[in-house]
Amino acid sequence: MCGYDLRNQPQGRRRFSWIDILLVAAVLAVLVFWWRIGTESVQETDTGEGVQAILPTNIPLIEATATPTPTDTPPPTATPVPLVQETVLIRHVVEPGETLLSLAIEYDVSVEEIQRANNLSSELIRVGDELQIPVLREGAAGQLNAPSNDFEYIVLTGDTLSTIATRFGSSVADIQSANNLAANDFIRPGDRLIIPVRGAPPAVLAVTPEPTLVPGVAPESVPTAVIYVEPRLITPEDGVTIDRADPVIFQWASVDLLAPNEWYVLQVLPRSLTAATFPTAWTKQTSYRLGTELAPIAGVSADYAWLVSVVRVKRTADGRTLLEAASPSSAIRAFTWE
């Protein structure tokens, strides 16, 4: 109204308060503080870890993995077959001038051993007499240590340890050891002996127990012992020589139809130091074969004797297994395999 122009008012000078200044200063101080902390940590990282990374003691060593050197597997070493001593009956025909003492010295045995092997009651021998000389030799344990089974036997009149051992496929030494018999002990009819028999087949051990007499049961139902005639040998003939390229075929005549608990027992006995030891053969057949793989090596001659008998096996109700001679032993034949 007075004519004053209110649109063009002069602007006054802007003022800042102390509070604003303090806030700005605080923010700047915080920024500077964090900037310094960050700079120092970066420097420590660059200088500390960087220096450590180039120190020789801190340089990791890379070791090459050792490649194992292949070693040749040594070939398996054959286990030596243990050797044990066995008795071989050597056939000797008495010549002029020989005595039991001279034979004992020649074969390194005692006079008593020769007498016992031949059932001699004195030292008298004659020219032409055939003697069995028991000689010790080393044999493979695998042949002599076959599974052994103990049987009982009742001694009969005329039995000797030698005849019992031969009939059942045992040995005098085994029978003496099983019965605690000394070398000079005698056996008598009626004595009960333990007979160790090696290599008897399972069927021999599987016989059924013998029936016992029961009141009210007729005695005829109890089986009675049958004694067969001695087996008659057929081949090989006595004294024959068989080529080592041929097998040895043993044959004998049948004594009769054998009972389930009866067997032919074939004994092949070494009669020279070069002869091998064969296991006893239990069979229901009237023949047996020794293959050429058992023949002596080329250039070696081996002497053997063989015989056959019929053996009966019984089992009692209390589990004892008894042996009986169901026939006399056959004649003894000899042959040479070379």
Image (cartoon, rainbow, N blue to C red):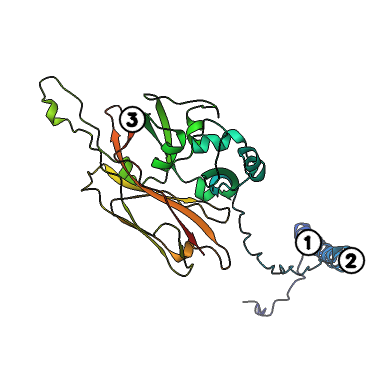
Q: CA distance from mark 2 to mark 1?
A: 32 Å
Q: Are marks 1 and 3 in contact (CB under 8 Å)?
A: no
Residue situated in front as seen by the camera: 128 or 320: 128
Left of 231 or right of it: where is 33?
right
Percent across and percent down for residue 265 are: 35, 47
Name which quarter of the figure residue 153 lies in.
top left
**Residue at the spot 57% in from the left edge and 50% down from the top edge:** 139
Considering the numbered disc 1 on the image, is that residue within a helix, a strand or a loop? helix
**Residue at the spot 53% in from the left edge and 47% down from the top edge:** 128
Q: Earlier in the sequence, mark 2 or mark 3?
A: 2
Percent across and percent down for residue 155 are: 38, 29
Q: CA distance from mark 1 to mark 3?
A: 106 Å
112 shown above or below 230: above
Q: Amino acid at mark 2?
A: Leu
**Residue at the spot 78% in from the left edge and 59% down from the top edge:** 30
Q: Earlier in the sequence, mark 1 or mark 3?
A: 1
- Residue at the spot of label 2: 55
- Residue at the spot of label 1: 34
- Residue at the spot of label 3: 320
Q: Amino acid at mark 3?
A: Arg
Considering the numbered disc 2 on the image, is that residue within a helix, a strand or a loop? loop
Q: Are marks 2 and 1 in contact (CB under 8 Å)?
A: no
Name the mark nearer the viewer: 2 or 1.
2
Considering the numbered disc 3 on the image, is that residue within a helix, a strand or a loop? loop
